[in-house]
Image: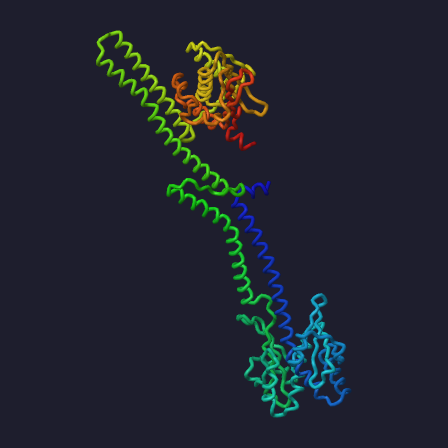
Amino acid sequence: MLSDALKKSIFLRIYAGLIVWVVMVAVFCYLLVQTINYQRAQEYRESLTDGLSYVISEGVARQPAKQQKIDWISDASDLLELPINYVTAVQVELSRAEKKRIAEQKSVVRYDANSGIAYIIIGLQGDASHYLSVTVDKLGERQMKALPIFVLDHLIFYPGQEREYLEKIRKHFSYPIEILDIKDISLDSEQIGRLRQDQSILLYRDNATVRGTTISIVSPMPNHPAQVLVLGPVPMFNWMPLQLSAGITLFSLFLLSLGVYGLILPLERKVRQVRYALNKMKSGDLSLRVPIEGSDEMANLSASYNNMSDHIQRLIEAQRELMRAVSHELRTPVARIRFGMEMLAEEDDYDYRIQQVDMIDKDIEALNTLIDEIMTYAKLEQGTPSLDFEAVLLQDVLEQVLMETEALKTQKKIELLVAETGLTVDAERRYLHRVVQNLVGNAVRYCEHKVCVSGGVRADGMAYVCVEDDGPGIAESDRTRIFEAFARLDDSRTRASGGYGLGLSIVSRIAYWFGGTVQVDQSLYLGGARFVITWPAKRYKQGEKNKA
């Protein structure tokens, strides 16, 4: 059901496609944010450890002997409460990018998202055969307060030059590290008291800027009671900073705009085809047809345009043919009337004048009949006539036509065969009568002795009327042409019989507006021509059609 609705509605396809595209863009952007944040988190972890790794590497390198190095590492491990191992280089397999970081005196951080444990590898200056391996399974206040101790342990070797040397190692830190006076920092009395007791303190700051929450580590300077070492502020990791949010939002809108354009493009292309065809029609070229693709609204629009073009082209051709035929057909009776009027003016014999008046009256009647035929044909050809379908007794219509025909005393035998008495069909009675009248009149005109008229409803629900005669029949090559306006297979015989070549054309147009067809072939019963018109016996009302 849904697939049929999508096939028949281009707008539903656009809406459904837009929903699917929005979901796809949302999933894609989510995965993109996850990927970007994974990389950002890795860079954040590395930036936090680079400076400390350098200081620890320097502290190990200052130890003269291997045992002293091991002892220093053991003390550092106890201070951080983190396992620090002194391992050989062959025990650690590094990638090219990791080797490059070690060469630049930076740390290598390997993070296991499943266990939440980070493994830090630190290169040692002057000792390429060993690395330090630190396993970080927790990072709390204890570890953070221990960080300044390693920096102070490094600065103690440069008494009086702490600021100068601090400036040299600052490039290894991604966050500020400096020596300040206590009075330059906004501290309360409790915090100052803890500093005077040689304790480090943590300062949390909530910032309204893009940096968000930051942490600063403040530690007292040995032998300088008025000064402190400040590490930070260190920004907390922000999973969705403003730049990333804005970038992802703009990127999502860009993808959505591309998706909408891609969904609208087929509709725009079809509209452009119809617009181009309409412009060609406006210029007088009716030969262009719009390709019909699918079964949606645009396909219906294309089909409607093509049908309209066909109808307009047919109307123009029919109008031209009608004008030529009318001018030809009207000349003969008008010429006879003119001739009769001239004869009346020159003739004194009363009986002869009465005879001429009768002939003129017949010619006028012929003109009326021709004009009626032309008006009926034009009405059926110009557009959809006003049809009032109702249940009609088929037998009544056929019997009425037979009575009217027999009243003309044609001396021809007309046989009526009806499949079912009381059978009703949906039709416009006036036009159905005209169809049967034209077919019977045509058969009587060309038959030898007998005409057979039958009607009923077939098993497929199609009503039919069949008219057969025992005349010469119609050649197969002419069976299509006889339904054209003013078409005559034998012009002299048609004139003699009083036909104008419009009767079968009217039958063809009525069959079309009835939603049926008319065909001609050879009668197996009488041997002459057989005309059969078929149309739906029952027509749906609008409400019944919707229920169906």
In the image, 513 versus 277, the foreground residue is 277
226 relative position to 268: left or right: right
Q: Position of residue 237 (x, y in %)?
A: 61, 70
In the image, 402 versus 314, the foreground residue is 314
Furthest residue to the bottom? 160
Q: Position of residue 88 (x, y in %)?
A: 76, 80
Report if residue 139 is visible in the image.
Answer: no
360 relative position to 447: left or right: left
Residue at 52% x, 56% y: name it.
Answer: 258
Indicate whether 55 appears above or below 391: below
The image quarter containing residue 68 is bottom right
The image quarter containing residue 340 is top left
Quadrant, the N terminus: top right
| Picture colour scheme | rainbow
Residue at 56% x, 67% y: name it.
Answer: 241
340 relative position to 71: left or right: left
The image quarter containing residue 149 is bottom right
